[in-house]
């Protein structure tokens, strides 16, 4: 019971299907997100576990922002690896070095920079690899 209303209890797989259908059928705010926010923690956990297992996003909206988040996560991870490797090879980095590395969004450039820095055997060569990769 919820107040004076009787709310039927549904199995998690039915809830997941209903949330997915609702989210896909309604333009505007992401209703599933709003609903998930107000669910009790134990119910939210059950629904999240069911949704995570191999779920393929159905709407263009969800696919776009999910993909965008993955891309940003890859960039962030690679930038972190570059910064760690550059600090290992060069010691302290200047603020300009850090800003230049953080400005790189091309995954290919970041990956190549990791490989280049990893192969260097001296501070001079590491500095040169960094300069080549960050040159405009």
Image (cartoon, rainbow, N blue to C red):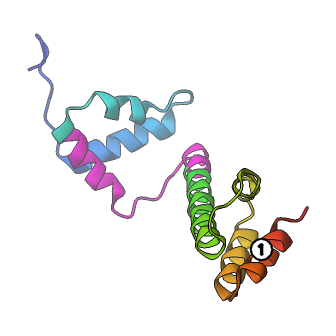
Q: Residue at x 33, y 46 (%)?
A: 17
Q: Is residue 45 magenta?
A: yes
Q: Which residues are magenta?
A: 43-65
Percent x, y of residue 8: 14, 30
Q: Is residue 120 left or right of residue 24?
A: right
Q: Residue at x 41, y 34 (%)?
A: 33
Comparing 79 with 91, the one in front is: 91
Dot 1 falls on a residue whose secondary structure is helix
Is 21 drawn above or below residue 8 in the view shown? below
Which residue of the protein is positioned furthest toward the left in this rendering? Answer: 1
Which residue of the protein is positioned furthest toward the right in this rendering? Answer: 136
Q: Is residue 11 magenta?
A: no
Q: How many marks?
A: 1
Q: Residue at x 52, y 27 (%)?
A: 29
Q: List the residue tagged with mark 1.
A: 127
Which quadrant holds the N terminus? top left
Which quadrant holds the C terminus? bottom right
């Amino acid at each position: 019971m919820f107040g004076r209303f009787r709310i039927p209890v549904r199995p998690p797989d039915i809830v997941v299907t209903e949330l997915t259908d609702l989210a896909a059928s309604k333009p505007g705010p992401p209703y599933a997100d709003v609903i998930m926010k107000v669910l009790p923690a134990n119910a939210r956990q059950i629904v999240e576990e069911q949704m995570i297992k191999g779920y393929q996003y159905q709407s263009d909206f969800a696919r776009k922002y999910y993909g965008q988040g993955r891309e940003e996560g890859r960039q962030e991870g690679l930038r972190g690896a570059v910064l760690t490797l550059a600090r290992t090879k060069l010691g302290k980095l200047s603020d300009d070095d850090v800003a230049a590395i953080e400005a790189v969004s091309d995954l290919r450039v970041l990956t190549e920079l990791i490989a280049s820095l990893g192969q260097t055997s001296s501070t001079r060569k590491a500095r040169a690899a960094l300069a080549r990769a960050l040159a405009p």
